[in-house]
Amino acid sequence: DKEILSGFREFKPFIGQCKFRNCAHINEPKCAIKQAVEVGDIHTKRYQNYLNLIT
């Protein structure tokens, strides 16, 4: 949801970088948000907070 995503400012540089335009950043392959979490560009706790809000 775009409204929820806007509350996660650290996600902004990665929005639009996913393989699929309709990526929900949950289970999709080549998700830029998930990749950013894996390399430490987005804190795991923040990503978990996002997941808690959308699921």
Image (cartoon, rainbow, N blue to C red):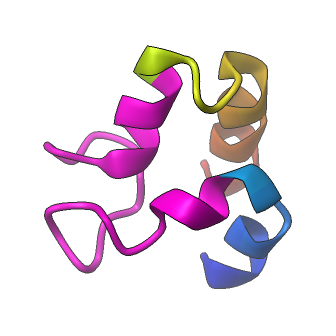
Residue drawn where x is 63% and y is 55% of the image: 11
**Magenta segment, which residues?**
11-37
Judged left or right of residue 29, residue 5 is right
Quarter placement of the N terminus:
bottom right
Report if residue 54 lies within the magenta region: no
Residue drawn where x is 47% and y is 68% of the image: 15
Q: Is residue 19 above or below residue 46?
A: below
Residue drawn where x is 69% and y is 67% of the image: 5
- Give the residue at the far right of this rendering: 7
Of residues 28 and 39, the one nearer the viewer is 39
Residue drawn where x is 51% and y is 26% of the image: 37
Q: Where is residue 16 drawn, in percent x and y?
A: 37, 74
Q: Is residue 39 above or below residue 12?
A: above
Q: Where is residue 18 drawn, in percent x and y?
A: 26, 61
Q: Where is residue 44 drawn, in percent x and y?
A: 66, 19
Where residue 41 sits, quadrant-wise, is: top right
Give the dominant element type of the magenta stretch: helix, strand or loop: loop
Where residue 38 sits, quadrant-wise, is: top left
Q: Is residue 15 above or below residue 51?
A: below
Judged left or right of residue 45, residue 41 is left
Q: Is residue 3 above or below residue 24?
A: below
The tally of labels here is 0
Judged left or right of residue 32, residue 29 is left
Report if residue 26 lies within the magenta region: yes
